[in-house]
Image: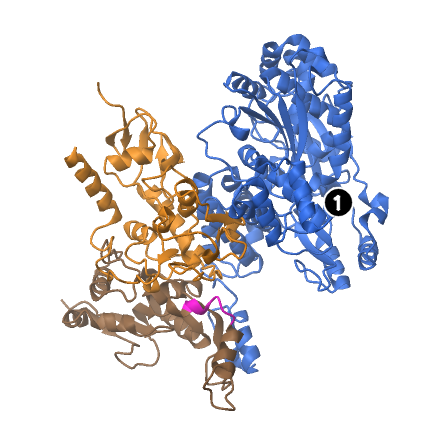
């Protein structure tokens, strides 16, 4: 009998710090076990630029700009299971703490009025740059999300438990000690 | 003389006349999730986390008197599901960013959400604008985390006799205010020695210059769950007797 | 007098009594325009409460202003029936003429324009309150004239008097509105019966609370009479805040003696010495007339000491004002408000009959219930129970409004069919009827054979008619905002739930919704019904639930997808960045649909 097909997994970081990806690496030698059963599609680990059809998509970070929306939609369109990984994807996290400020105030402060700016600095308007959204949103406010894995970042153990449950076809359950929001 | 009892999730719980379901359950080491209730004060009944099914009717356990032979459902999937939804409503109502909160690990809201397997806030966030009040030399007020349980209001009024806090407004705009025309805590006679300074279940009333003196990982709910702690405390009290 | 003296004189008039805070705040505001921070400090010092507590009360009620308001405060009544009569266009017209945004005060402090919850003038809308004076039947010409009067600073007393003419449109009278009683007649009959016998007659009559809950009045009076206490209190609940209800307005306008006499009979029966009418702030215009009736009754020996010569029968009535809070219609919230506090419903630890106003045994009855008590006193319980149905004796006043030729108040014996009411009021092409207000029940054409009664379709008095032009999603959305505005904010499910529901309904109405959002609404319905602290929260989803189950196509045709739609408008979310960068290229836009 052939070995079962490896599950395809894609990962990305939107408005995140890649801390959740670091935590994924923190599963240490279990990475080798993981690679026995999954193969990575688009991910910082592979440098594949676009997401193909996948079984599982792991999203780190919230949605803070137009590009985040496009990437998130690409993942949603291609992944059977979409997972919000980490505090920023789950509730906007640290970047969302700008939400009580008006975006125009922030842009003006950063590009015009803050001390130490070189003269002639303007708010960048290059079409290559994604525009920031008025507020930072958790990903479930933009696409349907199947599972949430909280934590800042979720620990390697939490990620491992979560993924092995998913791969085994069980609804993931972390239990006390592995669920953490900090 | 045999003691009066009622059934909580199929177990007989003894109670004395006048005790609420919450008080009797607590004494017996049974955890009923709660936020606005505190063992040292009378029930308030606002957070509704302690909603149980008593003889088939939904009631807040902290304000419902225990009665002989009543049948109470507590940790059923149906009730825990409602509680999880209530928690999620509280999480999106305020700005609860645990990673940057000094109360993380000591927070009753967070510990209750862990106990109830809350994996996300689920609803769309309100992201309200609630400026902090850092005016007081000893205490910081971070209103972003307020869950309107009124513990500080009640304790300052009934125990400290100072009436430092009150709720203002109504509906989703309801918010905590302090007893000063300026709206600043520094302009009240609030002190770190007030009982109200210690009673906040979340991270609104914080002592200054004490941040993270106990590291994450060694905090109140880091080792054992809030439910386990209730069970252990009751067992310890039993042993003392 | 300077400001401080004005505040001190108001305080003195109320004996510096904190339990009279509502009246103190209202009178201070009437004199000073708004309640400034230092005003609240002075009042707090005067009544010996903490400032924070005074702020808690002042900030709770819609009609108290802790921020400056215009010298002319125009509030457009915003019930769904006002909307159906075009209030939104008229308000827009007014705002444009005044160069003003709704909710804002004009820069010169002259005027502010905003909306307010139903003012009880649904049969003669669109209505406005100007400085809390009711003006019905607004028109485009009326708006034009009003703008002129405002801009010229004309005092309200010089405005056309006929504008303030609130008419009583009584369309059908039965036993209650055709009572034929003279002042004192029912009271005398009650005194002749004696207190116990009066209560017994009331129990025989089967009279049930007309506010909506339907608790037997006789049982209520008996419980209060049997409660130990040095004194007892009778409260007339005239907070008529349920959208679409205006039948108490008719009783208070045309039959105030009946209402006061019902209170006095209650006082005689339960041994109470003090009575309060809790009059909703929207009915401020009735105050002077009602005071005059009370004076007349005092002069006639129907109030005061030794009433009708009965030694020791001392009872008087005072009118207290609400200040724009629907939740105060809940009787324990009403009592809290009467004590000067925010209208937060009490825990059910104590019945009000045992511990009510200021801890005294308290009887709270609806205006209509009290008026009916007069009939029982005169004619006896058996006579009273002679009409109606088995569990709903007597008659019911219905406030009919919406799409019909003859809106107004109709009195019917209980058991009348919805179809009969519709025929009588001249409703054609009727699509739906909303009975009992925003918290009530939505009936479809198939249900018009149902009967108004506690057994079938209970009603607090509202009967709003919708014809085939109407969109029932819009009605439910409107009510969802009403509840979000009126939630007292005490309990989690109602405080946050009503806000979540309003947001979901907006999303659906804007055509951005999906089945996911519908399921969310059902989930909130189940949560709020079971876990809310009071009736406001547990009924706040009724209209959503009823329209979802009975008028689902109204939702389906607005739905964008069956699966999921973003929580917010993505393209609008780039608006500030577009403005700041001056970009308008394709990369500077987002669509809410997945395809882009």
Reply above or below: A90 against C282. Answer: below
Reply above or below: A33 against C503. Answer: below
Q: What secondary structure is marked by label 1?
A: strand
x and y percentages locating residue C348 in the rendered image: 46, 31
In front: C200, or C289? Answer: C289
Q: Residue at x 38, y 44 (%)?
A: B36
Q: Residue furthest bottom?
A: A119
Determine whether, in the image, residue C331 is placed left or right of residue B158: right
C518 within the magenta span: no
In front: C256, or A21? Answer: C256
Location of residue C133 (image quadrant): top right
Determine whether, in the image, residue C295 is placed left or right of residue B35: right
Q: Which residue is mark 1?
A: C133
x and y percentages locating residue C112 in the rendered image: 70, 57
Q: Is residue C467 visible?
A: no
Number of numbered discs present?
1
For chain C, give the colour.
blue
Please give the chain letter of the residue carrying mark 1. C
Q: Which residues are magenta?
A: A96-102
Question: Which chain is orange in the rendering?
Answer: B
Reply above or below: C510 against B190. Answer: below
x and y percentages locating residue B101 in the rendered image: 34, 61
Q: Residues within 10 Å of mark 1 (few under 14, many from 20)?
A: some
Q: Residue at x 73, y 19 (%)?
A: C302
Question: Which chain is brown in the rendering?
Answer: A
Determine whether, in the image, residue C45 is placed left or right of residue A14: right
């Amino acid at each position: 009998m052939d070995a079962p097909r490896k599950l395809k997994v894609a990962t990305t970081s939107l408005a995140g710090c890649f801390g959740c990806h670091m935590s994924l690496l923190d599963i240490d030698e279990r990475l080798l076990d993981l690679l026995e059963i999954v193969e990575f599609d688009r991910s910082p680990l592979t440098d594949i630029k676009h997401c193909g059809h996948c079984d599982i998509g792991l999203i780190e970070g919230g949605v803070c700009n137009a590009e985040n929306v496009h990437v998130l939609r690409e993942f949603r369109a291609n992944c059977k299971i979409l997972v919000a990984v980490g505090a920023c994807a789950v509730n906007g996290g640290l970047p969302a703490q700008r939400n009580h400020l008006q975006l125009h105030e922030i842009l003006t402060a950063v590009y015009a009025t803050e001390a130490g700016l070189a003269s002639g600095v303007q708010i960048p308007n290059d079409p290559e740059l994604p525009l920031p959204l008025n507020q930072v949103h958790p990903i479930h406010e933009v696409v349907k999300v199947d599972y949430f894995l909280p934590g800042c970042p979720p620990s390697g153990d939490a990620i491992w438990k979560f993924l092995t449950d998913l791969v085994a076809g069980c609804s993931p359950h972390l239990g006390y000690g592995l669920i953490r929001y900090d | 003389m045999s003691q009066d009892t009622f059934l909580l999730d199929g177990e007989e719980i003894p109670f004395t006349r006048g005790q609420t379901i919450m008080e009797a359950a607590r004494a017996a080491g049974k955890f009923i999730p709660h936020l606005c209730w505190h063992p040292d004060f009378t029930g308030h009944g606002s957070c509704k986390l302690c909603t149980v099914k008593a003889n088939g009717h939904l009631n807040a356990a902290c304000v419902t008197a225990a009665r002989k032979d009543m049948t109470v459902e507590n940790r059923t999937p149906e009730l825990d599901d409602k509680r999880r939804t209530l928690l999620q409503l509280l999480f999106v109502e305020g700005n609860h960013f645990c990673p940057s909160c000094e109360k993380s690990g000591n927070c009753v809201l967070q510990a209750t959400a862990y106990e109830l397997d809350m994996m996300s806030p689920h609803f769309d966030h309100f992201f309200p604008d609630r400026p902090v009040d850092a005016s007081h030399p000893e205490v910081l007020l971070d209103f972003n985390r307020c869950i309107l349980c009124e513990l500080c209001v009640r304790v300052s009024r009934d125990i400290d006799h100072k009436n430092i806090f009150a709720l203002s407004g109504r509906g989703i705009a309801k918010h905590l205010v302090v007893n000063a025309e300026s709206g600043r805590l520094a302009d009240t006679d609030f002190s770190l020695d007030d009982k109200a300074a210690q009673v906040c279940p979340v991270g609104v009333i914080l002592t200054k210059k004490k941040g993270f003196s106990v590291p994450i990982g060694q905090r109140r709910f880091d080792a054992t769950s809030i439910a386990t702690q209730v069970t252990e405390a009751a067992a310890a009290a039993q042993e003392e007797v | 007098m300077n400001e401080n003296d004005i505040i001190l004189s108001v305080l003195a008039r109320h004996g510096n009594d904190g339990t009279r805070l509502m009246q103190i705040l209202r009178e201070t505001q009437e004199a000073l325009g708004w309640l400034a921070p230092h005003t609240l400090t002075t009042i707090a010092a005067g009544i010996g409460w903490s400032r924070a507590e005074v702020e808690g009360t002042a900030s709770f009620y819609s009609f108290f202003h802790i921020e400056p308001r215009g010298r002319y405060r125009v509030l457009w009544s915003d019930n769904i029936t006002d909307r159906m009569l075009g209030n939104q266009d008229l308000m827009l017209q007014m705002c444009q003429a005044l160069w003003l945004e709704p909710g804002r005060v004009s820069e010169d402090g002259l005027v502010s324009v905003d909306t307010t919850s139903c003012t009880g003038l649904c049969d003669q809308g669109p209505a406005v309150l100007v400085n809390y004076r009711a003006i019905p039947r607004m028109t485009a010409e009326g708006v034009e004239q009003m703008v002129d009067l405002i801009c010229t600073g004309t005092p309200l007393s010089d405005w056309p008097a006929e504008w303030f003419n609130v008419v009583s449109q009584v369309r059908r009278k039965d036993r209650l509105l055709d009572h034929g009683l003279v002042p004192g007649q029912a009271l005398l009959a009650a005194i002749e019966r004696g207190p116990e016998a009066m209560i017994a007659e009331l129990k025989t009559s089967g009279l049930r609370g007309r506010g909506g809950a339907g608790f037997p009045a006789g049982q209520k009076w008996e419980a209060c009479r049997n409660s130990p206490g040095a004194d007892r209190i009778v409260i007339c609940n005239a907070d008529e805040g349920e959208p679409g209800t205006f039948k108490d307005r008719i009783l208070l306008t045309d039959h105030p003696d009946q209402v006061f006499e019902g209170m006095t009979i209650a006082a005689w029966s339960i041994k109470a010495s003090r009575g309060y009418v809790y009059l909703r702030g929207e009915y401020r215009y009735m105050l002077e007339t009602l005071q005059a009736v009370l004076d007349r009754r005092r002069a006639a020996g129907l109030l005061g000491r030794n009433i009708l010569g009965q030694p020791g029968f001392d009872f008087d009535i005072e009118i207290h004002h609400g200040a724009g809070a629907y939740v105060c219609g809940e009787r324990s919230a009403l009592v809290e408000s009467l004590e000067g506090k925010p209208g937060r419903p009490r825990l059910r630890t104590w019945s009000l009959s045992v511990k009510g106003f200021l801890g005294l045994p308290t009887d709270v009855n609806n205006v209509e219930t009290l008026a009916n008590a007069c009939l029982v006193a005169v004619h006896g319980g058996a006579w009273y129970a002679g009409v109606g149905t088995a569990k709903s004796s007597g008659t019911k006043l219905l406030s009919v409004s919406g799409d019909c030729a003859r809106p107004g108040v109709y009195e019917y014996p209980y058991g009348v069919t919805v179809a009969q009411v519709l025929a009588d009021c001249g409703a054609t092409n009727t699509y739906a009827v909303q009975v009992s207000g925003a918290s009530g029940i939505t009936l479809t054409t198939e249900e018009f054979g149902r009967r108004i009664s506690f057994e079938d379709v209970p009603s607090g008095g509202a009967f709003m008619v919708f014809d085939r032009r109407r969109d029932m999603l819009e009605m439910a959305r409107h009510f969802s905002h009403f509840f979000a505005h009126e939630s007292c904010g005490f309990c989690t499910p109602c405080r946050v739930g009503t806000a979540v529901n309003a947001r979901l309904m907006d999303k659906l109405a804007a055509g951005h919704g999906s089945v996911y959002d519908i399921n969310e609404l059902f989930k909130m319905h189940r949560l709020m019904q079971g876990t809310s602290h009071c009736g406001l929260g547990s009924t706040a989803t009724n209209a959503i639930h009823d329209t979802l189950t009975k008028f689902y196509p109204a939702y389906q045709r607005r739905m964008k997808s069956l699966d999921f739609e973003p929580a917010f408008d993505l393209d609008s979310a780039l608006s500030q960045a577009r403005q700041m960068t001056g970009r308008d290229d394709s990369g500077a836009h987002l669509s809410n649909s997945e395809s882009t």
